Amino acid sequence: MERAVSACDRCGLCRTRMHPAFGEGDRHAAILLVGEGPGREEDLQGRPFVGPAGQLLDRMLAAVDLRREQVYITNIVKCRPPNNRNPEDAEAHACLPFLRRQFLLIQPKIIVCLGAVAARHLCDPSVRITRDRGKWWVKNGVRILPTYHPAALLRDEQKKRDAWLDFQSLREVYQQLT
Ligand code: URA
């Protein structure tokens, strides 16, 4: 599938990307984290969440005793949207079949939506992240938690407290399920 993503031209992002960031981590992880799309550093390295937001994500995971290698991390779109704009719906829909296949292979028990873009595609289009973060969804037996995108926490420190509560809740549910 990684090769298919590297060769993918289903949307216009293929024209401006350097390297798709397919996803990485434990292919049998109980927790799948889904962001929005690669940023500059991710595009250079072809890996998800390796820039400043990714470093914060690593620290948040560590705070609940999780290492990056224990979870699986990917994005709604695998190629960088120019200037880090949000992915358009058409781009997301073109790319979602890859995420669906990742989901089927990994069979996670928990999905964490990092930010509104992921939550709108994976929970419901009406999600508002400030209102709906921290509320668990269950879809086909899979628990889904929307929380802030780590980049939002870098822009607004005040959101960190709520994100911390969400990660505590993640740890509790993870411990119950494993
Ligand atoms: N932001 C995202 O949504 N995904 C990444 O991989 C990096 C930054």
Image: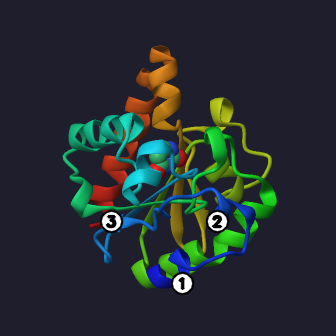
Q: CA distance from mark 3 to mark 1?
A: 33 Å
Identified by mark 1, the residue type is Ala
Q: Is residue 46 above or below residue 49?
A: below
Q: Secondary structure at mark 1?
A: helix
Q: Image check: 42 left or right of 119?
A: left
Q: Position of residue 35 (x, y in %)?
A: 52, 51
Residue nearer the viewer, 122 or 86: 86
Identified by mark 3, the residue type is Leu
Q: Which mark is residue 145?
A: none
Identify the residue under disc 1.
Answer: 4
Residue drawn at x 32%, y 57% is 174
Tag in front: 3 or 1 = 1
Q: Image check: 88 left or right of 45?
A: right
How many other residues sit within 10 Å of disc 1, few (<14), some (14-19) or many (≥20)?
A: few
Q: Image check: 31 left or right of 159?
A: left
Q: Position of residue 100 (x, y in %)?
A: 59, 77
Identify the residue under disc 3.
Answer: 177
**Dot 1 beta carbon under 8 Å from ligand 1:** no
Quadrant assignment for the C terminus: bottom left
User: Which callout, 1 or 2, points at the residue further toward the start of the chain?
Assistant: 1
Identify the residue under disc 2.
Answer: 14
Q: Is residue 132 above or below residue 94?
A: above
Residue drawn at x 41%, y 45% is 41
